[in-house]
Image (cartoon, rainbow, N blue to C red):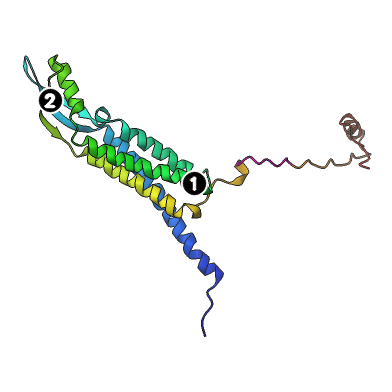
């Protein structure tokens, strides 16, 4: 005889996967944004510029090379929070923005990993010649760390797109409704208390409640 699965058992699977995906998305999204922001504040490249007194050391942080990863990390963090404030199509749109933020960080960080424009500008200023370029150019691993942060944000966005419909949303009591609020029914005034009778008359009510 074939056993019939209990409805609660069938519902437990999607609910459990929804909780796990939610926890993973929150962790990866928040961690990815923090990693990307931290990486943009670190040294991405270094070199020297030839000046009259010799070689002048130059360094460029991630924010000097490109401001895209830091900006998209903030956008991604905001989208991660906003995904719980919307439902249905709005949640899909915000989840897509979250995923695109991560993809954009990866692309910008990898492009900046071999970029020398920021150091060339510094070399031109140090040498006093617009044609001057940086010498002994070197790069660090921080651009790839920023790309890893973008990958975590991308993962959070993909999880939101796949499992977002199972995640909770803000309570409906915080949302405005177009329906008018029901009016409270006035309690009949106590005839034994004259002050209640006068208050009812002042409000234009029948103190007898008839």
Give neighbour class at mark 2: few <14, some 14-19, many 20+ (Cα, 10 Å): many
Relative to 12, 112 lies left or right: left
Horizontal side of residue 85 vs 57, given as left or right: right
Mark 1 lies on residue = 91
5 horizontally vs 162: left or right: right
Report how far apart the C-alphas of labels 1 and 2 lie in the structure. Answer: 47 Å
Residue, disc 2: 134
- Residue name at image x 42 percent, y 45 percent: 96
Q: Which residues are magenta?
A: 175-181
Classified by dominant secondary structure, the portion drawn in magenta counts as loop
Residue 17 position by quadrant: bottom left
SS category of the residue bearing label 1: helix
Name which of mark 1 and mark 2 comes first in the sequence.
1
Q: State the image quarter where residue 145 is shown.
A: top left
| Label drawn at residue 34 | none
Q: Compared to 196, does 80 lie above or below?
A: below
Question: Which residue is at a point 66% across and 41% down the rendered structure image?
Answer: 177
Q: Residue 67: give x, y in percent of width and height.
A: 30, 30
Between 5 and 198, the residue placed more toward the observer is: 5
Q: Residue 186: percent from the left, percent from the top?
A: 84, 40
**Crowd around label 1: few <14 · some 14–19 · many ≥20 (10 Å):** many
């Amino acid at each position: 005889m074939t056993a019939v699965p209990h409805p609660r058992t069938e519902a437990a699977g999607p609910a459990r996967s929804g909780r796990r995906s939610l926890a993973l998305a929150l962790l990866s999204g928040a961690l990815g944004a923090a990693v990307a922001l931290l990486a943009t504040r670190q040294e991405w490249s270094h070199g020297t510029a030839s000046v009259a007194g010799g070689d002048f050391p130059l360094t460029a942080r991630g924010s000097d090379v490109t401001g895209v990863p830091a900006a998209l990390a903030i956008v991604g963090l905001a989208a991660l929070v906003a995904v719980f404030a919307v439902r249905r199509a709005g949640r899909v749109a915000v989840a897509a923005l979250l995923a695109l933020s991560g993809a954009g960080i990866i692309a910008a960080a990898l492009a900046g990993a071999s970029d020398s424009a920021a150091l060339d500008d510094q070399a031109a200023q140090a040498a006093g010649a617009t044609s001057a370029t940086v010498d002994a150019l070197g790069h660090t691993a921080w651009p790839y760390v920023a790309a890893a942060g973008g990958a975590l944000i991308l993962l959070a966005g993909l999880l939101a797109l796949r499992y977002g419909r199972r995640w909770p949303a803000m309570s409906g009591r915080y949302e405005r409704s177009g329906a008018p609020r029901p009016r409270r029914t006035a309690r009949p005034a106590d005839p034994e208390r004259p002050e209640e009778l006068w208050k009812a008359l002042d409000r234009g009510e029948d103190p007898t409640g008839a």
